[in-house]
Image (spheres, coloured by chain):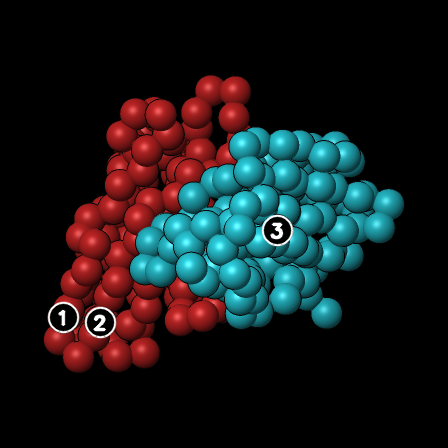
Amino acid sequence: QKEVEQDPGPLSVPEGAIVSLNCTYSNSAFQYFMWYRQYSRKGPELLMYTYSSGNKEDGRFTAQVDKSSKYISLFIRDSQPSDSATYLCAMIENNAGNMLTFGGGTRLMVKP
Amino acid sequence: GAVVSQHPSWVICKSGTSVKIECRSLDFQATTMFWYRQFPKQSLMLMATSNEGSKATYEQGVEKDKFLINHASLTLSTLTVTSAHPEDSSFYICSAVGTPGRNWQFFGPGTRLTVL
């Protein structure tokens, strides 16, 4: 079993839809949670990061962490075709410095 | 801030040759840089971690003599793929950490290597 599980998709939604992307994890030592967006043939771009359980909002994006369930989510409101990309969740253990453990990524397609 | 560049963005080489990829932090000093490899439709696989002025730490299964990493300064790390073979063809991505007050890795745009 992988430490971080993420549905690979592809997830296809119409423009304007609310998108929900999720990851589950098994290592209770993970304390920092990040979402990266990766366009085709580009490097990942940091979208959001959170530390504690709860919600964090940034524009159309909301990151949610539930440590008791070991479950994190990224919600995208009013999705746009430009949101079409692969979304990677990533986590850091409390005492692991900057070492990231990635999920496999979910490919999202937003159709006009 | 926190911009990381890679050069070249795309390289094609013949089997048996060596290829050097540069990773630069443009607006901050990177105490640590990471090198990843990514195959199509797969997630990033960490190859090695490099700290400025010290030897790189390689992940299990990564040949250190084949993938030479040099982190000679706080803004530059290089990955040299020695005696490249077609199976080394992949997307290589670096990341850097070091922005004061932040722990996050910032990624370069990647280098696509094709070995003929």
Above-or-below relation of A75 to A53: below
The alpha-carbon separation of the residues under discs 3 and 1 comes to 44 Å
Circle 2 residue:
B114
Circle 1 residue:
B13
Above-or-below relation of A46 to B57: above
Output the letter for the chain in cyan.
A
Nearer the camera: disc 3 or disc 1? 3
Q: Secondary structure at mark 3?
A: loop
The x, y position of residue B71, in whole percent, is: 31, 40
Report whether residue B68 is seen.
no
Residue, x 33% and y 45% (percent of image)? B108
- The local crowd at label 2, few if under 14, some if 14 to 19, many if 20 or more residues have their Cα within 10 Å, is some
- Is residue B106 toward the left or the right of residue A28 in the image? left
Report whether residue B114 is seen.
yes
The alpha-carbon separation of the residues under discs 3 and 2 comes to 38 Å
Circles 1 and 2 in contact, beta carbons < 8 Å: yes
Q: Nearer the viewer, residue B77 or B103?
A: B103
Say which chain tag 3 marks.
A
Circles 3 and 1 in contact, beta carbons < 8 Å: no
Say which chain tag 1 marks.
B
- The local crowd at label 3, few if under 14, some if 14 to 19, many if 20 or more residues have their Cα within 10 Å, is some
Circle 3 residue:
A18
Outermost residue toward the top in this view = B100
Q: Colour of chain B?
A: red
Residue, x 52% and y 20% (percent of image)? B101
